[in-house]
Image (cartoon, rainbow, N blue to C red):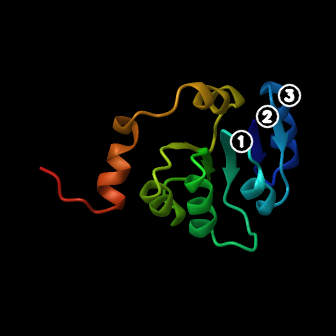
Amino acid sequence: MILIFTDNEQLDRDLSKKIEDSRIVYYPDYVLEEQQATTLIATIQPNKYNFKDFMFKVRQKNIQVILILENENVKELKDALTLGIYDIIFDSFTLDEVVEKITNPNPFSKVSKYIKDILELEIN
């Protein structure tokens, strides 16, 4: 089961049409209670949990997260990388890019530049 939690009605509908076995979700508690979820496609959105706490709970369930972010400068990018969320898509993107991440997650090498810079790792 792939959960779509973007808070963008048009994007939700478009993704739902392209992705088999998907469900649009409106509440964070549903994501945390869902037992069959394998993937969560999400954006940063206000809810009763803060972003880091919510994503930590999602990752504890071994759910792959495909995170859609406005740009590389959002503060939540650091939290996402720390939590092992490597499937990050920045605006502007196509629906096909999102669908591709479901079956072909980003390798570490694709996000290593963000990890090194944002997490301020000193690696020679």
Q: Earlier in the sequence, mark 3 or mark 1?
A: 3
User: Mark 3 falls on what kind of element?
Assistant: helix
- Asked whether disc 2 touches disc 3, contact meaning CB atoms under 8 Å apart, the reply is yes
Please state if 113 lies on the left or on the right of 104 as rendered: left
Q: Amino acid at mark 3?
A: Lys
Q: Amino acid at mark 1?
A: Ala
Q: Which residue is drawn at the image coordinates 37% and 51% (left, top)?
A: 114
Which label is found at residue 15? 2
Q: Can you tell which quarter of the image residue 39 is in?
A: top right
Disc 2 marks a residue whose amino acid type is Leu
Q: Position of residue 51 (x, y in %)?
A: 62, 66
List x then y, in percent, for residue 84.
Answer: 45, 51
User: What residue is rendered at 59% in x and 69% in y?
Assistant: 53
Q: Residue at x 85, y 28 (%)?
A: 17
Q: Which residue is mark 3?
A: 17
* Relative vertical location of residue 24 with respect to residue 71 in this rendering, above or below: above
Mark 3 touching mark 1, by CB under 8 A? Answer: no
Residue closest to the eye, 64 or 60: 60
Of labels 1 and 2, the one closer to you:
1
Mark 2 residue crowding within 10 angstroms, few (<14) / some (14–19) / many (20+): many
- Mark 2 to mark 3 CA distance (whole Å): 5 Å
CA distance separating discs 3 and 1: 18 Å
Q: Which residue is mark 1?
A: 37
| Quarter of the figure with residue 19 | top right
Q: Which is nearer the N-term, disc 1 or disc 2?
A: 2
Furthest residue in direction left, as rendered: 124
Q: In terms of depth relative to the viewer, which is nearer, 64 or 120?
A: 64
Image x and y of residue 14, in percent: 83, 33
Taking 63 as reference, is 19 left or right?
right
Question: Which disc, if any, is residue 118?
Answer: none
User: Does residue 35 appear to the left or right of 88 in the view shown?
Assistant: right
